[in-house]
Structures are given as C-alpha cells and as structure tokens.
Image: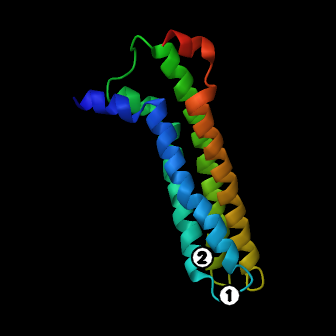
Amino acid sequence: MFRSLMTVLTSRYTIGLISLVICVPMLITLTEVSKALWSKPDLKEEMEIVTGIGIIMIGWGVVLEERKTLREIFGLLDAPDEAWQTIVDHACHNYGVGQLAIGLMAEICIELIKIPNTIIYTGEVDDYLVAAGLVFVGVGALLLIRHVIVMFFLLPRSVTAAH
C-alpha cells in the first residue's frame, strides 16, 4: 500500500499538479509585493513573503531534483516502465535544479538587506533588492509553469504511446 502511494506521489501528473499549486502563491506574490515597492518605507512583510516563497522554491526544487532517489528509496526502480520513468526523472531533475538555483537567488537578494549596514550597506537599494528577489520569483514561476506543461503534455510521444 505504501509503495502504491509513493507511485502516485511520484507520478508526472501529481508532480505537475503540485507544481501548478505552488505557482499560485508565487503569482500572488508578484502582484502583491510589487504594489508595495517604492510606496512603503518599511518592506519587512514583503521581505518575509519573498523569503517564504524562496524557501518553497528551494524545497520543491530539491524534491524534483531527487525524484529518482525517492523512487529508489521506496523500491520503485526497475519497473516495467523504467525507460519512461527515467525520462520523467531527467525532466524533474533539470527543472528542480533550476527551481533550486532561482529560489536561492531570490533568498540572496533578501538576505543582503538583512545583513547589518555596517557589513554591507544597502540603505538606498532595499527596494531594488526586493524587486530583484521578485524578479527571481517571477522567473521561478515561469519555469514551474513550463514544468507543468512538460509534465502534462510535452514528454516524448514515442515513450508515452507505449505506456
């Protein structure tokens, strides 16, 4: 039963659906945080939002990147459709690395603001750094939307026809 659950959780449709769900707060972040830029003196809440989304991006990127390892841990390797699963693993790995790197860049932008100005002076550029973090969130959202499309529609037809 647990093996069946893990088969469902690592399926391309479940992964695509989770990626789509993660896109929703990312897109809301883009609209809400961009409204506050250059209009509020204090961006603490916006920084926390970008930080939270960055952490979600990093976490989901790691999960995507390690799909094959998860399948190995739960004894799902060497199934009759292993050639197909390898293609899905490869796509997830690539998009996972992208999501991880982009999420880290969003985090770096925000962490630069949090470092005391005596170490790194960011006094006049805080809004720009939050905006840069927001750009990375946007790029991550675009990457996840593309990942959803790949998971649902664009994997090679020659393999999908057989499975």
Check disc 2 and report the residue beneath it.
46
Residue drawn at x 52%, y 45% as measured from the top left = 19
* Residue nearer the viewer, 50 or 161: 161
Image marks 1 and 2: residues in contact by CB distance under 8 Å? yes
* Corner quadrant of residue 98: top right
SS class, disc 2: helix
Residue drawn at x 77%, y 79% as measured from the top left = 125
Rendered view: 13 above or below 161: below
- Alpha carbon distance from label 1 to label 2: 10 Å
Residue 138 is labelled as none
Residue drawn at x 38%, y 26% as measured from the top left = 72
Rendered view: 103 above or below 17: below
Rendered view: 80 above or below 138: above
SS class, disc 1: loop
Check disc 1 and report the residue beneath it.
40
Position in image of residue 15 (x %, y %): 48, 38
Q: Quadrant of the N terminus?
A: top left
Position in image of residue 108 (x %, y %): 64, 65
* Corner quadrant of residue 105: bottom right
Question: Which residue extends farthest left?
Answer: 1
Position in image of residue 39 (x %, y %): 72, 86
